[in-house]
Structures are given as structure tokens and as C-alpha cells.
Image (cartoon, rainbow, N blue to C red):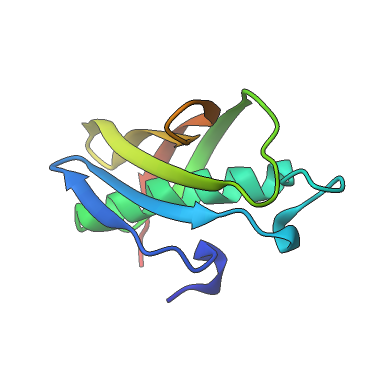
Amino acid sequence: MNPLTLGLGFSTTSASSVAADCRITAAWQGYSGIMHGGVISTLLDAAMTHCLFHHGVKALTAELNVKFVRPVAVGLQLHVSAALVKQRRAVFWLNAELADSSAIYATAAAKFVRAEC
């Protein structure tokens, strides 16, 4: 397992999406008690990468647009999900979301390009 996936175990939720649950730890905080935005971005990017793995695709992030909707407190149990929304040749567009049952904390839209490896 790649340590940069932050220890998440992704599972498929539909033909085009994956998801994982995670508890926000103090190791992921920026300001005291608040999750660092870079770690939020990493979680969303990892979810989208795992979604591509589910489709048998190795690709690199070409563009990543993250919207931080509300602060994420340390200790929360959250759900990160990602879905493939479009593909054209070697380019893939995906969306991801970090949420719990009552709120969305962050969303992302990204473009990936097939890796030549």
C-alpha cells in the first residue's frame, strides 16, 4: 500500500465510483484542531486515483480544483468518495467529495492523463 493514501482502504460503490471511511487524526491538522487543507487535497486526489485503479488505469493528476466548503475538525469520522465522470482517449475527468451524513466538507474536480509507465 502506498503510504501517501493515508492508510485508506477503498472499495467500489458502483461501476464508476469508489469510497473509503476515515477518522481525522491530529497528525493531519494544520491549525490546532483543524485538518490541513493539503491533507484534504491529498485525500480527494487519492480517492480519484483509486477510482482510476478500479478501472485498470494508471494516470497522473494534470489538474486538481478543490473547494473547501467548511473546516474539518480533528476527530471526525468522514467518508471520501470519487467517481469517473468522463473519458476521452488518454484523459479522464473525475469528481470527489469529503463528507459525513450531515455535511459536505470539501469537493474536488480533476483531470488525469494516462501514465506512460
**Residue 25 screen position, x and y as percent:** 66, 59
Q: Let me know if residue 57 appears in the view.
A: no
Can you tell which quarter of the image residue 54 is in? bottom left
Left or right, residue 94 beside residue 106 = left
* Residue at 86% across, 45% down: 31
Kindly indicate the quadrant of the structure image that contains residue 26.
bottom right
Does residue 1 appear in this view?
yes
Position of the N terminus by quadrant = bottom left
Q: Furthest-right residue in view?
A: 32
Q: In the orientation shown, which residue stands out farthest toward the bottom?
A: 1
Furthest residue to the left? 15
Q: Residue at x 39, y 45 (%)?
A: 48
Left or right of 34: which side holds 112? left
Q: How many marks?
A: 0
Instruction: Residue at 50%, 41% (x, y): give it.
Output: 62
Residue 45 versus residue 116: which sits nearer the camera?
45
Left or right: 13, with 49 as reference point: left
Vertical relation: 8 (above or below) 102:
below
Where in the figure is residue 68, as x and y percent of width and height? 64, 27
Q: Residue at x 26, y 57 (%)?
A: 11
77 relative to 87, above or below: below
Percent x, y of residue 117:
36, 67
Percent position (x, y) of residue 99? 48, 35
